[in-house]
Amino acid sequence: MRAVKWTGEAAQGYPYWWDALTDEPSDDGLPERCDLLAIGAGFTGLSAAIAAQDCGAKVVVVDAGEPGKGASTRNGGMFGAHPRLSWDRLAAQYGADLADDLMAESAPATAWTRALIEAEGIDCDLQQTGRIQLAWTETHFNNLKQLVRHVTEKSTVKMRLVERADLAQEITTGRYFGGAVLEEHCGLNPAKFHQGLMRATRQRGIPVVGHAAVTKLERNGSGFIARTGKGDIRADKVVLATNGYTSKPFNWYAKRIFALPSYIIATEQLDANLLGHLAPGRRMMVETRARHSYFRISPDGTRLLFGGRAAMVDVDLHKAARRQFETMCEVWPELQDVKLSHVWTGNTGYSFSHAPNVGETRGLHHAMGYSGSGTVMAPYLGAKAAYQAMGDARGKTAFSHTAFNGYWAHPFAKPHFLKAVDIWYRNFVDRKESWQSR
Ligand SMILES: Cc1cc2nc3c(=O)[nH]c(=O)nc-3n(C[C@H](O)[C@H](O)[C@H](O)COP(=O)(O)OP(=O)(O)OC[C@H]3O[C@@H](n4cnc5c(N)ncnc54)[C@H](O)[C@@H]3O)c2cc1C
C-alpha cells in the first residue's frame, strides 16, 4: 500500500469545508414549550423549522452536538436529485404509477432547494457544473443506457450518454467504459449552505439549541415532552431529523435507517493545468462501481476532493486516507506523489429500500434515509415533513409511500451486520469488479 504524505494543514477528521466557515458557534437557550420541535439541526431539521414557522408555528430546533456537525457539513457537496434505483427496480417494488411519481419528483425537488438557496440569499459557492456517472464495467455502461432512457422518459431531468470514445472531453483516464451526464446537477460548499440555513433560521427568531441531545421523548396528552441534556421542552408536534446519526431513544428508526460511513480526502493545492488535464469537464464525478467513489474539483478550482467507501465500518482515518488515496491513483496514476491536506468521515443514513421516507408514526413525524443523496432531498423532504405535521397540503410527496422497513440482519439499533458486509465487499465484490473492468 502507498504511503500518504500530508501537508500539515488540518488535523485528521477536520473537513476541508469547515475552513470556509465565518460564523462563530453560538447557542440559544431552550424554551419551555413550542408548537413544533425539530430534533436534529442539519439540512432536514433547519428546513423543517423554516417551513413550520412559515405555517405560523412557534418552532425550536435541538441538536445533540454542534448544529451542522452531522453529515450536512461533511458531505461531498454534490447537489442534485435522481432516484438511486432504476425505474425497473422501483416499478418492481412499488408498481409503475409510484415509480413514475418518484422519478418525476426529482426535478421539482432540485428546483425547490435551489429556490430556497436563492430566496435566502445563501452564498455557498453553488455552481452548475453538471454531474457525470462513470461506468466501471461494460455491464455498468449498458445499465446507464437504460437509466438514461427511463430518466428522460419519466421525468424532465436532462440526462445524456457519453460514449467511451468521447469520454476524454470529461476525464483523462482509461478506466471507464463510458458515462452519463446530468446537466442540471451542481456543486456547492455544504458547510456554507448549512451556515446560510442557520442564519435564515435564526433571522426568523427560531432558537437552535446545540448540545441538547433528546434522551427521552414522552407522550403528553396529544403532544410530547422531550427530555434533553439542557432540560425539558413540551411540543405539540415533533419532526425527527436525525438521519445517519439516529440512535437511542429512537431505536425504532435506527432499525430502519443504518449509519454507513463515507470517507473523503482532499489533496494539496494542485497546478490549474494539471486539474484541467485530469478533469477537463470539471463536473461532479461519480463511479458506478460498488466502491462508490465520488470526486470533484474544489469550488475555488485548486484541489481534488475524493470520497467513497474506504470502509463500511469506522476505521482509523489514516487507514481510510490510504485506501482513498490508492483508489484515486487507480483513476489517475499521475497523482501518486501528491500530498493530502484533509481526511474526514461522516455517516450517511441508508434505508433498506435505498429511498428516503417521509411520514408519521404514533404522532412523531420524520424525514430520513437519503442514502447518500441529501443535499437536495434533505431540505426538500424536511420541509415536506413539517408541512405534514402542520396539516398543510404542501406536504404531499411520493416519498411518503416508499418502504420504511427493518431487516432481519439488523435487529438492534447498531448496524453490526455491516462488519460482515464490509468483508464481503472488500474480498469478493471489489475483486470481481476489478476483474470485470479489465
Ligand atoms: C461523507 C459524506 C458525503 C456525502 N456526500 C453527499 C453528496 O455529495 N451529495 C449529497 O446529496 N449527499 C451527500 N451526503 C449525504 C448528505 O450529507 C445527507 O443526506 C444530509 O446531510 C442529511 O442531512 P440531515 O439533516 O438529515 O442529517 P445530519 O446533517 O446528519 O443531521 C442529523 C443531526 O441529528 C442530530 N441528532 C442525532 N440524534 C439526536 C438526538 N437524540 N437529539 C438531538 N439531536 C440528535 C445529530 O447530532 C446531527 O447533527 C454525504 C454524506 C456523507 C457523510
Image (cartoon, rainbow, N blue to C red):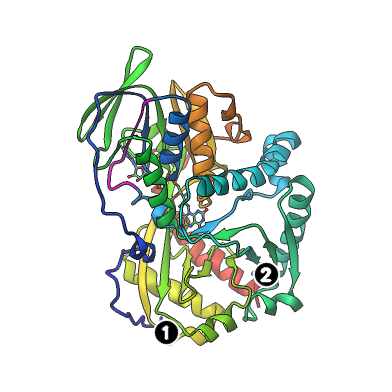
Q: Residue 15: where, in percent of width, then height? A: 36, 63
Q: Quadrant of the N terminus?
A: bottom left
For disc 2, the neighbor class at 10 Å (few under 14, some 14 to 19, many from 20) is many
Residue 146: quarter of image: bottom right
One can see residue 298 in this view: yes
Residue 108: quarter of image: top right
> Mark 1 is on which residue type?
Val
Q: Which residue range is magenta in the image?
A: 58-67
Q: Is residue 354 left or right of residue 368?
A: right
- The residue indicated by pointer 2 is 137
- The residue indicated by pointer 1 is 338
Residue at image location 46% in from the left, 58% down from the top? 124
Q: How many marks?
A: 2
Residue at image location 35% in from the left, 49% down from the top? 68
Q: Is the CB of mark 1 within 8 Å of ligand 1?
A: no
Q: Is residue 352 above or below residue 307?
A: above
Q: Is residue 241 left or right of residue 185?
A: left
* Tag of residue 381: none
Residue 181: quarter of image: bottom right
Q: Residue 374: where, in percent of width, then height? A: 51, 49
**Of labels 1 and 2, the one closer to you:** 1
For marks 1 and 2, give the CA distance: 28 Å
